[in-house]
Image (tube, grey):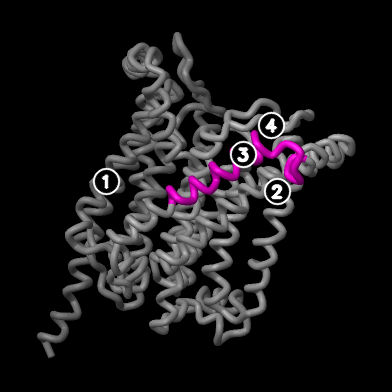
Amino acid sequence: MTAVKEVARRPIGHFAERSIAGLVAVTGAGVAFGLLLLLVRVQWSPLQDVDHGLAEWFNGLVAPHHALVTVLQAVTDLGGRPILIWLVTIAVVGLLIRRQPRLAVYLIITGVGGLILDPSLKTLVGRLRPVVDVPIASAPGNSFPSGHALGSFVAYGALLLVFLPAMAPRWRKPAIVGVGVLVALVGLTRIALGVHFVSDVLAAWLLGAAWLGVTAYAFRLWRQERGRPVPPLTEGLEPEAGHDIAPAPAEEHVLAHPRSAVAELLVGWVIVFGALYGFGTYVSYHAKGTFFDTLDTKVPQWFAERHTEVLTDVSWWWSKFGDTHAILLISLVFCPLVLAVWRRWRPVLFVALAMVGELTLFLASARAVDRPRPPVENLDGQMPTSSFPSGHIAATICVWLAITLVVFPRTDRWWRWIFVALAVLMPVGVATSRMYRGMHHPTDFMGAILLSALWIGLLYLVIRPNEDLKEGNRPAIESEDVGSLDDELARAGRAD
């Protein structure tokens, strides 16, 4: 009996030991942040001298190098709210799909807390941003603390704690180091770009460490109160959830023969490019007096004669559904959800290659054909690419067709027909808008259809995105067995 009691005490004792050390660290981070906040508020001269001196030094080092500025801006965007909110939101939805509501709640509370702390403290302190000789970046609001540094520390740190159990043990330390390096780089870019002082970034890191420590400690208390063992943080928050939250635990090989698949896709890409170049050259320079020439002449003129203020506004918004940002956003939302539901990388690879192939084929064929825009008013002005084929239309067709080919065979619910409708309506709407705005000929639309049909067809034959269905793969959300997807998500959210 004594031995049993001793075994029961061990998790509690270990938790207490680790908690004391953790609380000391969290308290230390909080005290250090408070001290730094006080020094900034009283405008302590030594700290101000260091801040302003380093701001000027970094500005002189970075400002003359435009390529370096571009790299720094790309890195700093990884700590911006759009990227962080997208990552946390996708992770929360994925965790709910995988029936991990506790971890989802942890991410929500931790993320929302970080969003509240940043503007609140900026308003409280009211510190102005650095003034440098050669401004190379700008940011709204006050300076202390750095929102990018705080947000990246909290968001990436919380995601790391949640998903560590899904990694193989040998990859956990490299993942911790990688996240640490990423957070450090984001903070350093804020200083190098001249939008924050060094003390702003240091304060953000200290506050992020304190907040992340508090929420992790609360989660561990939650586990301890439910009688669950409390592991060290190097194993993640919920080690037993590792298999459930792993992206594709049942998939040993994405492709059975990856080398032959790569060769087939490369050869196929060349063939598709050849078909595009041949068709594009013909309709652009050798189709005089043909049906194609009549179509390309009459249709742009017909649209140009019917311009109205309302239709121009509608065409602008609808055209945006086919631009790079919209297509990228759709892909970045759809791919993680597919991975969460069906636990397979192959459909994700199919969609990703669809977009990469479409972009490269569009750029290559547009450069090779070099077709002028229609001889009517071009409402979007001068564009960096030529007219054939339409990149907006091709991207819209590819993304919605690829999504439909993945979703439609995987469910028999009524809502699968929504994707079929979107695969038709979205390209038609984007095509009409692009031609209304005088940016494309009708045969540019035909070129986009040719590109999409050939490339998506090739990918479908080579990648076989639905091959797992032959093996009896079932979704993590059993949408075939419940009334709707929403019901299952609600049930997952109520689970213990």
**Residue 274 forms part of the magenta stretch:** yes
Q: Which amino acid is tagged 4?
A: Arg
Q: Is 305 drawn above or below residue 163 in the view shown? A: above
Assess whether mark 1 and mark 2 are in contact (beta carbons under 8 angstroms).
Answer: no
Of residues 423 and 444, which is closer to you in this image? 444
Instruction: From the image, tell me which residue sits under label 3.
Output: 388
Instruction: From the image, tell me which residue sits under label 2.
Output: 430
Q: Quadrant of the N terminus?
A: bottom left
SS class of the residue under badge 1?
helix
Tell me the CA gap for discs 4 and 1: 46 Å
Tell me the CA gap for discs 4 and 2: 17 Å
The answer, for residue 38, to whether it is visible in the render is: no
Q: Please state if 171 lies on the left or on the right of 66 as rendered.
A: left
Tell me the CA gap for discs 4 and 3: 8 Å
Assess whether mark 2 and mark 3 are in contact (beta carbons under 8 angstroms).
Answer: no
**Residue 432 forms part of the magenta stretch:** no
Q: Which amino acid is tagged 2?
A: Val
Assess whether mark 1 and mark 3 are in contact (beta carbons under 8 angstroms).
Answer: no
SS class of the residue under badge 2?
helix
